[in-house]
Amino acid sequence: MFIAKVIGNVVSTQKNAKFLGMKLLLVQPYISRDSKLEISGSSVVAVDSVGAGIGECVLFTQGSSARLTPATKDAPVDAVIVGIVDTIEVGGNILEKP
Amino acid sequence: MFIAKVIGNVVSTQKNAKFLGMKLLLVQPYISRDSKLEISGSSVVAVDSVGAGIGECVLFTQGSSARLTPATKDAPVDAVIVGIVDTIEVGGNILEKP
Amino acid sequence: MFIAKVIGNVVSTQKNAKFLGMKLLLVQPYISRDSKLEISGSSVVAVDSVGAGIGECVLFTQGSSARLTPATKDAPVDAVIVGIVDTIEVGGNILEKP
Amino acid sequence: MFIAKVIGNVVSTQKNAKFLGMKLLLVQPYISRDSKLEISGSSVVAVDSVGAGIGECVLFTQGSSARLTPATKDAPVDAVIVGIVDTIEVGGNILEKP
Amino acid sequence: MFIAKVIGNVVSTQKNAKFLGMKLLLVQPYISRDSKLEISGSSVVAVDSVGAGIGECVLFTQGSSARLTPATKDAPVDAVIVGIVDTIEVGGNILEKP
């Protein structure tokens, strides 16, 4: 899984029927450098399965496992938010989430 | 999933039988930088399952989940367009799609 | 899927039994930049399932879907050529295949 | 699989039910350059299935195979630690793990 | 699949039970540039299923297909060596394997 920041949302009307009612969020993965978190360049669209909101730090899963939540069962999705991150601890310090 | 722009189409005559009748589109993923969308360098060939056209901004799914649309069932495909994107909102603004 | 050029072939004698009789081709993916195709640096070994030859432009599938052709059923392969590309059209122009 | 160093842990309260009781570790993959190991920039969150601790060098598996441990069965996870690495030998030398 | 050079081996005692008896090799993928093979920076740990040895040039498979050899059936592995490469021919020449 990767840690990411929820930065926006995506609206689609003409779409696969399984996407009806799904909340699509734009997330931007963090990378860690010198025990700090930085936002990376590439963004991913992930289905929300845990009630995540804009600005929150989340954990998301990719690939076939993305279909294993109640919100995404049997749907053609490859990324899903599976948790809201409270803290990330590295070297005894709680990392700041930029 | 990733957001991409449909930039072209691909024609193949000699192909796997499951590809008969499939519309193959060339899509170019967007990356987001400083709350703007930019076109990235790598392009992907995705099966259209929602009636997408050239120039449109779409959502596409990769991996085994790409087989979970009516258009791609049991076919040897690894990328499918699952929605046409109306809007992408970041920080209260609707992003322009270059 | 990705578009690639077939640049060579790979011979292996000591191999998994499912590879017996498989044609293994070395393919080099194209990337598109400024509406042109360029050869990228990384090459992939893909099983041929459509009768592709050296120098041809092909479409290949990766991941679990690579097992869904008659040539690759249940085999431990992760890349298969599924079509020979006739034309790629971008912006009304047929792209040259370098 | 990739070799990585366990550098931290991740706490999430609001999460998918299958994550209850899972230990989520932040791991940073090694790359090898000139027969030396170096820490790469991108970090991954992996479920621990073998009792790994901070600072240890581990082996982790990604993708659908990440669901094939007792700790991760049927869960929406895409990365799991499957072993603690004792030694890595290259060219007759045991590599140091930075 | 990718072509790689076997550069070392990995020993792990505390590990998932399915890894008992598996030979874990460190392989370094080749990339091709100007019809030559070069060693890339990132290394992968792959299970040996064909009797490969240090210094040999091998073919390895990633993802769910890595579980489809007798040596890796149902195990949480994502990379397996499926063949020892005899020759790679590009442009009528047999490439040297550095």
Image (cartoon, coloured by chain):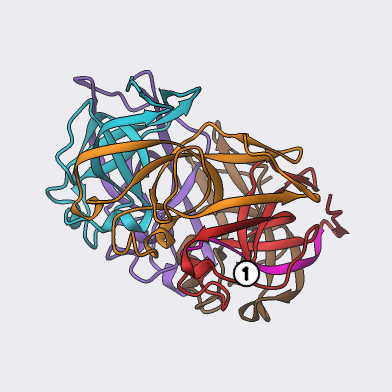
Chain colours: A orange, B cyan, C purple, D red, E brown
Q: Is D47 contained in the magenta span?
A: no
Q: Which residue is mark 1?
A: E48
For residue C95, above or below residue D92: above
Q: Does residue B38 appear to the left or right of B51 in the view shown?
A: right
Q: Farthest residue to the left: give it.
A: B21
Residue E82 seen in the current view = no
Q: Residue at x 64, y 47 (%)?
A: D43
Q: Quadrant of residue C74?
A: bottom left
- Which quadrant of the figure contains the N terminus of chain D? bottom right
Residue B95 sits above or below residue D95 on the image:
above
Q: Nearer the viewer, residue B35 or C31?
A: B35
Query: Vertical placement of C9 versus E35: above or below?
Result: below
The region drawn magenta spans D76-89
Residue E49 in picture, x, y percent from top left: 58, 72
Horizontal and vertical percent position of residue A41 = 53, 31
**Residue count near mark 1 (Cα–Cα under 10 Å), binned few <14, some 14–19, many ≥20:** many
Q: Tell me the chain of label 1.
A: E
- Nearest the camera: D96 or C24? D96
Which residue is located at x 16 percent, y 47 percent?
Answer: B22
Q: How many marks?
A: 1
Is residue D87 shown in magenta?
yes
Residue B50 percent coordinates (x, y)? 17, 43
Of helix, strand and loop, which one carries label 1?
strand
The percent position of residue A25, horizontal first and vertical second, equals 39, 42
Q: Amino acid at mark 1?
A: Asp
Magenta stretch: helix, strand or loop mostly: strand
Left or right relative to E49: residue C97: left
Q: Residue at x 37, y 61 (%)?
A: A67
Left or right of C46? Residue B45 is: left
